[in-house]
Each structure stands twice: as structure tokens, then as C-alpha cells.
Image (cartoon, rainbow, N blue to C red):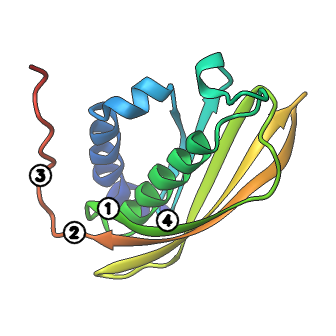
Amino acid sequence: MTGDVEADFAPIANRIRTSLSQQGFMAHIGAELCELARGSCTLAVDRRGELLQQHGFFHGGVTAFLVDNATTIAAATSRGQPALTAEYKLNLLSPASGERLICRARVIKPGRQVAVVAADVFCVIDGVEKHTATALASIAMLENVPARIPSPA
């Protein structure tokens, strides 16, 4: 049975990976897809000077980006549909320092039109994860339409 589930998920995972490879902002930020499974996604980014705010912490916008992308990707895995963020509530629990920022998203309630997805963000300090943010997102599920990425000018 597990083999069948994995075989069914493989085309979805391939579409998601292809889509992410075309996402310029993901490359710009330097985010990496660490884990992808049905109903979940983990993204991470390593510390770089341009991702930090004036006090040396990861900028809240980096945390927000990871939540936005990871929750949308997690929702897309549940039914294999393209998805867009409709809204999210982000609670920044503590400053995000350390050498790496990790966002783990999981589908709470899949839906045909809207999925509810939770995410937790951790910073890694000397190999230890510290919980720095948590979020709840409503993700709009789209009809199966091809991505329309404009070609570079």
C-alpha cells in the first residue's frame, strides 16, 4: 500500500519541484526545499548578511516568505492542485538568530477550495532549534492550470 501512495505522490512532487525551480524569489532568498511529503513541506534558508535586519536577526520578511511558500506548497501536496496564499496570521515569538531558519508546514484541513495549513519556524543556534514563529494560513486551491511564468526580458 505504501508503494502505491508514493507512486501517486511522485508526479505531484515533480510538478512542485519544477514550479519551485522557476520561482525567482526562492532562488534570490536562497531558500531550499528540505522535505516534501503529502500534506507537508519544509523549507530552510542559511544565514546571509542580506537576509538580516539591523540587529543581526533574520528579517521578519524572511520568516514571512518561508511561511507563505511552505504553507502553499504543503496545501498543493494534499490534492495535487496549484495553490495560492489567501491569508495567514503570523506570530513572531522571538528574534530569529543563528545560522539557519527552518519552516515546517503541515495541512490541518485539506479542501477543494480552501486548505487550512499551520507552520512553525525555528532558528538553528549551535545545532539546537529554537521556536521563533508560528502561523496559520488559508490557502486557495486552484483548478489545475499550468503555471504562467513570464520569460525574462
* Marks 4/2: CA–CA distance: 16 Å
Residue found 44% across the figure and 69% down from its top: 87
Q: Residue 142 carries which label?
A: 2
The type of residue carrying mark 4 is Gly
Query: Given contact means CB atoms under 8 Å apart, are the residues at marks 3 and 4 in contact?
Result: no
Query: Splitting the image into 4 quarters, where does residue 72 fall?
Result: bottom left
- How far apart marks 3 and 4 lie (CA) works out to 21 Å
Circles 2 and 1, Cβ within 8 Å, touching? The answer is: yes
Helix, strand or loop status at disc 3: loop
Relative to the observer, which residue lies in front, 143 or 47? 47
Asked whether disc 3 touches disc 2, contact meaning CB atoms under 8 Å apart, the reply is no
User: Which amino acid type is shown beneath numbered disc 3?
Assistant: Pro
- x, y (%) of residue 66? 54, 46
Upstream in the sequence, badge 4 or badge 2? Answer: 4
Disc on the earlier residue, 1 or 4 = 4
Between circles 3 and 1, the one closer to the viewer is 1
Foreground mark, 1 or 4, reads 1
Q: Nearer the viewer, residue 65 or 40?
A: 65
Q: Position of residue 94 (x, y in %)?
A: 83, 51
Circle 4 residues within 10 Å: few <14, some 14–19, many ≥20: many
Q: Nearer the viewer, residue 123 or 104?
A: 123
Q: Mark 3 points at which residue?
A: 146
Q: Which amino acid does label 2 sit on?
A: Leu
Q: Viewer-nearest of labels 3 and 4? A: 3
Q: Name the residue under label 1.
A: 84
Callout 1 secondary element: strand
In space, the residues marked 2 and 1 are separated at their CA atoms by 7 Å
Mark 3 → mark 2, Cα distance in angstroms:
10 Å
User: Which of label 2 and label 1 is nearer to you?
Assistant: 1
Q: Marks 3 and 1, Cα distance to the nearest angstrom?
A: 13 Å
Residue 138 in which image quadrant: bottom left
